Amino acid sequence: MIFEDIKEKKVLVTGAGTGIGACIAEVFASCGAFVGIHYRNSKKEATALKNHILKCGGRAELFKVNLLDSSSREKLIPAFVKAFGGLDILINNAGGIYGFKDFLKLDEKSWEDTFTLNAKSAFFLARDAFFYMKRHGGGKIINISSVSAKYGGSSQSIHYGAAKAALEAVTKGLARAGAKYNILANSIRGGFIDTPFHKKIARENITERINLIPLKRAGKPIDIAKTALFLGSSAGDYVTGETFTVAGGD
């Protein structure tokens, strides 16, 4: 099996209570990985996911952390390492938009929180993971980006697009810094994926948005999850510093 080497890998997925993150966690767990499910508010969903993984014979633990709060965020990697005895793969999936409004009305707090969640917290979690991986033979960091980084977002999500562009720049920097330590870093640039988050952004223009996609359909969380699985497995052992666009040609 191509993904057999994922078995017993220790994988932390942020924003894994729902949507893409939950799918990523489930897919890795189905291949035998030990999965850390990070969440902030989705306790019910995160708990259900953990119970599902355990029922299927896997191993999973929950980690509730507010990534907007540095004192809370800095406890996540140490807590994961303590729970699982190591860290092989960090998947920075947590993301979102604060202040989804026309940029002419955008307030600084919304800008700052959007950057903190999508770029700042991902960088510092990656840095904390880097410290551990450097001492333990390497590892992999996978950052979940968005086609907003390519297009700059809509007039209501310019700050989100900018934050994701920053995340992709962080990925390339981490890849260069990590190469000599066998720490590989890559980004997955997701397109319009069929989740509540993307439906909220598109709102009443969902059909119009989908028609802009060459494949003429929305993506599914599993499309992102399978790409993450590829990068996390030995199939991705000679890939670093890259951005993989999973967007139906968008």
Image: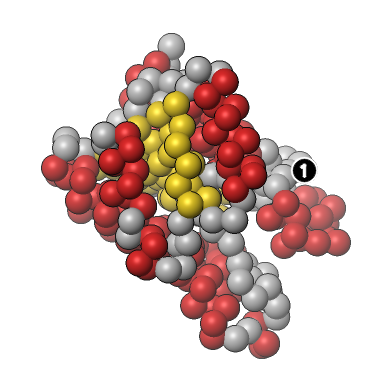
Q: Is residue 198 left or right of residue 118?
A: right
Name the element at disc 1.
loop
The residue that appears at 46% across and 68% down in the rendered structure is: 68
Specify the quadrant of the image occupied by residue 33.
Answer: top left
Q: Is residue 9 visible?
A: yes
* Position of the N terminus by quadrant: top left
Q: Quadrant of residue 208?
A: bottom right
Residue under the image location 44 percent in, 26 percent down = 59
In the image: residue 13, left or right of residue 136: right
Q: Relative to 84, is 13 on the left or the right?
A: right
Q: How is the image coloured?
A: secondary structure
Furthest toward the top, the residue is 1
**Residue 152 visible in the current orientation:** no
Q: Nearer the viewer, residue 56 or 181?
A: 56
In the picture of the structure, the residue carrying the numbered disc 1 is: 216
Give the residue displayed 51% in from the left and 35% down from the top. 25
Residue 182, position as x, y percentages in the image: 20, 39
Residue 70: x percent and y percent? 37, 68
To which quarter of the image does residue 99 belong?
bottom right
Residue 54, above or below 130: above
Nearer to us in this view, 51 or 129: 51
Residue 43 position within the rendered picture, expressed as x and y whole percent measured from the top left: 60, 48
Please tell me which residue lies in front, 134 or 56. Answer: 56
Would residue 178 be found to the left or right of residue 73 on screen?
left
Task: Name the kind of residue labelled 1 in the image.
Answer: Lys
Categorize mark 1 by other alpha carbons within 10 Å: few (<14), some (14-19), many (20+). Answer: some
Please give the count of numbered marks on the rendered protein.
1
Q: Is residue 150 above or below residue 241?
A: below
**Where residue 92 sits: x, y (%)?**
44, 50
Residue occupying the point 45% across, 37% down: 61
Give the vertical position of 101 relative to 165 (above or below): below
